[in-house]
Amino acid sequence: MSTAGPPQGAKAPLGGRDLHAQERGDIRVPRPRITRAPVHGVLLLDKPLGLSSNQALQKAKWLLRAEKAGHTGTLDPLATGVLPLCFGAATKFSQLHLDADKTYETTVRLGITTSTADAEGEVISTQPVSCSVGQVVEVLDRFMGEIEQVPPMHSALKKDGKALYEYARAGETVERAPRRVTIHDLDLLDLDLQGNTPHLSLRVRCSKGTYIRTLGEDIAKALGCGGHLSALRRVATGPFEAAQCVSLEALEAMGEHERARALLGTDVLLAGHAPVTLDADNAGRFLSGLRRRGLWPDSAQVSVWGPPQNGHAVLLGTAHVKAGELIPGRLLSPIDIQQTLAQAASTAVG
């Protein structure tokens, strides 16, 4: 039997190896494919400085080997803090959290105005800081309650189908309509008006859609010296606080089982929903999209549950009640429910 290789110039057989190519070192070893799995729940992430919300999401998704993921609203790359990430079934309810109030801690550097209202932009102007503590308190009072903000050019808000930051990068400024937002609380945590880096440290609890960069810039402008944000941290969003969050670094150091246990149940997104529990027959009909009748009071937001299985609660979806009718909203699929129950049983072991 001949042991000679293929004729000169011939290609190696399909599935075979080109030994000469191997000697030359130009064989490409295929990367192992990541096996993704159905993962359901909410991860409260403490987003690090420098990553976009989507970059943080993709990193967490990779670590959890999750098939489907999304977040509940963006956080600037130059901001850190609370970023709820939704996986699997939880993505169906992520929109509900977009309306949640947010709480931030921020530092406004006084005397230096930048093109982006934060430390990343180019310096536009510098001015002396000559305001007093009394003036600071008086100005902060002006920004309490319902106020109008002009969205910054460096934002993802769209005009004519194009993000404002795209216009800004091209050196264009376009007209933006003011938006009404609400500042619920505006606390002065610290200040330095005389040092080399004059600043205000603030804690802000605000409605959705509030631009903290714009708020800081407007406060500094009202003080007569201009300014920009030099630090920003989101410490709470809705019911979720920074103390509950896990960092990407900590998540990376965990084992697979521990990462799964870091997830909260999908129902944490339904805080404030009135719970309704159905029996097995009505639960099945509800999941088919049928309305149910019962002695329930009218309610705009309802979380609907089926009978517990093996000690685990069974979330079916959301609804609202009107005139004794339970009207389905967003529903989980039977597959979502069974996978969530299997995940709960798996993480409960050990």
Image (spheres, rainbow, N blue to C red):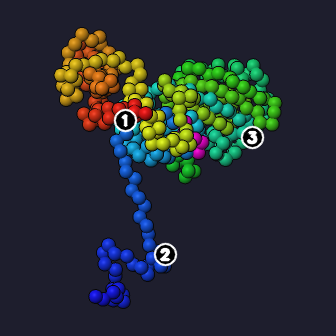
Displayed quadrant of residue 322: top left
Please give the name of the residue rendered at 69% of the width and 39% of the height, measured from the top-left corner: 113
Instruction: Report which residue position mark 1 lands on.
Output: 346
Q: Is residue 145 magenta?
A: no
- Tag nearer the camera, 3 or 2: 2
From what the image shows, is residue 96 above or below residue 35?
A: above
Q: Is residue 123 visible?
A: yes
- Tag nearer the camera, 1 or 2: 1
Please give the name of the residue rendered at 44% of the width and 73% of the height, measured from the top-left corner: 27
Q: Is residue 150 visible?
A: no
Q: Earlier in the sequence, mark 1 or mark 3?
A: 3
Q: x%, y% of residue 36?
A: 37, 48
From what the image shows, is residue 211 above or below residue 294?
A: below
**Location of the C terminus (image quadrant):** top left
Region rendered in magenta: 46-50
Instruction: Report which residue position mark 2 lands on.
Output: 25
Near mark 1 (Cα within 10 A), the count class, few <14, some 14-19 or many ≥20, is few
- Label 1 residue SS: helix
Q: x%, y% of residue 138?
A: 69, 19
Mark drawn on residue 301: none
Separation of residues labelled 1 and 3 (CA atoms): 59 Å
- Label 3 residue SS: strand
Separation of residues labelled 1 and 2 (CA atoms): 44 Å
Q: Earlier in the sequence, mark 1 or mark 2?
A: 2
**What residue type is disc 3 on?**
Thr
From what the image shows, is residue 213 above or below residue 145?
A: below
Q: x%, y% of residue 47?
A: 55, 39
Instruction: Report which residue position mark 3 lands on.
Output: 126
